[in-house]
Amino acid sequence: QVQLVESGGGLVKPGGSLRLSCAASGFPLDYYAIGWFRQAPGKEREGVSCISSTDGSTYYTDSVQARFTIFRDNAKNTVYLQMNSLESEETADYFCAAGPGTYCSHYVTRYNYWGQGTQVTVSS
């Protein structure tokens, strides 16, 4: 059974950090491009970051550049999103997604498999 499970969300104060995990089962993540998305209440799902399957190239939306880092641990079949200097506007449900092939994208249509999401709340 193909499954993606996110974890690592929670409540953090502005300026704080969280590391989200996206663990895959039923398929090898290293053959898939992986994206991280977020969706705040009443807003569209937004592509935050992604990582390609073979060359490890990455993408970050402008607002998270230099604060977020996406990386893989293929031995654990897991992709991570390290989030630093979090801002209150970044409160949202965070989702990971997987799509076959090499290059990643910040468009939702690139991905076949989605996790259930993990909630991130940035508040003092």
Image (tube, rainbow, N blue to C red):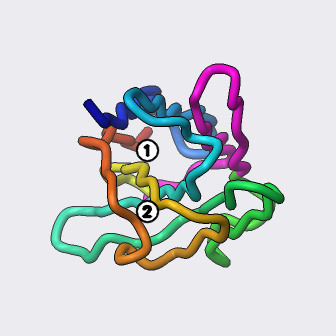
Q: Residue at x 55, y 54 (%)?
A: 34
Where residue 61 sits: x, y (%)? 62, 74
Q: Is residue 78 above or below residue 85?
A: above
In-image side of 31 versus 25 (left or right): right
Quadrant housing the C terminus = top left
Which residue is denoted by mark 1 in the rendering? 122
- State which quadrant residue 19 falls in: top right
Q: Are marks 1 and 2 in contact (CB under 8 Å)?
A: yes
How many discs appear?
2
**What is the CA distance from the residue labelled 1 to the residue labelled 2?**
8 Å
Magenta segment includes 81: yes
- For badge 1, the amino acid type reads Val
Against 101, residue 110 (above or below) is below
Quadrant location, the N terminus: top left
**Element type at marker 2?**
helix
User: Which amino acid lies under the numbered mark 2 shown in the image of this protein?
Assistant: Glu
| Start-end of magenta stretch | 69-89
The answer to whether residue 66 is seen in the rendering is yes
- Could you say which quadrant of the image residue 49 lies in? bottom right
User: Would you name the residue on which mark 2 appears?
Assistant: 89
Q: Is residue 10 visible?
A: no
